[in-house]
Amino acid sequence: MFSRIKSDIQAVFDRDPAARSVLEVIFCYPGLHAIWFHRISHWFWKHEFWFLGRFTSHIGRFLTGVEIHPGATIGKGFFIDHGMGVVIGETAEIGDNVTLYHGVTLGGVSWEKVKRHPTLMDNVVIGSGAKILGPFTVGKDSKVGSNSVVVKEVPPNSTVVGIPGRVVMATEKPQERLDLEHGKMPDPEAKAISCLFDQIRELERKYAVLAAEHEQLKKKLG
């Protein structure tokens, strides 16, 4: 148990440059507290103490602003930065070393009592405000941009942005360290507009050539 707690604390230091001391991390990081509350509630849930599981989860939500259903499965090295507004559904599955920023929702799109929530593989990073909705998989080493709405499978080593979320970058090999530098993330709308401008410039060039040929023809005939 203590090794797991130590791993949780180390995950904060690895992914938050603002962390300065162990004491600060233990007492001032609601995302970390939410994970610890979930460990307790998940134990109750696995042992069929349904009410205690939900009640412990509810206390954690009240104190941290993070709502994690006790049925959710979470791996090692999980990190929730800032925490407020994060919602993780009952059938969500989260791999190792996953990072969520504030306002992220791992939600469902069905009322059936089946797998309704997403599966995040190892090393996934989800930007603030993003919504991952449905029982599909976000592949290993992928990242989702802030405020994106993802409703279908994401291949490994991919970058997803937009509403609905689209894969705008995919690599064969994972990055050594995933980041969330949104200023460097591709902008599919800007790329589309740039392509339109290129086509307009090409049409203008062709029109100028045709106009010049037309003037020359008029002079010959005149």
Image (cartoon, rainbow, N blue to C red):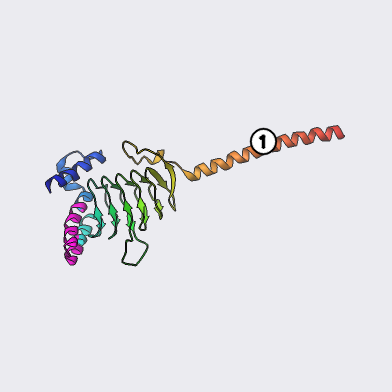
- Left or right, 7 with respect to 118, comes to left
In the foreground, 158 or 128:
158
* Residue at (50% x, 45% y) in the render: 189
Neighbor class of circle 1 (other Cα within 10 Å; few <14, some 14-19, many 20+) is few
Quadrant assignment for the C terminus: top right
Hey, which quadrant is residue 132 in on the image? bottom left
In the foreground, 80 or 138:
138
Most extreme residue toward the front is 172
Name which residue type carries label 1. Arg
Most extreme residue toward the right is 222
Residue 131, image x, y percentages: 36, 54
Most extreme residue toward the left is 2
Residue 93 visible (yes or no): yes
Q: Is residue 126 above or below residue 41?
A: above
Q: Secondary structure at mark 1?
A: helix
Q: Is residue 19 magenta?
A: no
Residue 5, image x, y percentages: 15, 47
Q: Is residue 45 magenta?
A: yes
- Left or right, 138 with respect to 37, comes to right
Residue 95, image x, y percentages: 27, 49
* Residue at (54% x, 43% y) in the render: 193
| Residue where numbered disc 1 is placed | 205
Residue 169, image x, y percentages: 43, 42
Q: What is the chief secondary structure element of the magenta stretch?
A: helix
Magenta segment: 34-56
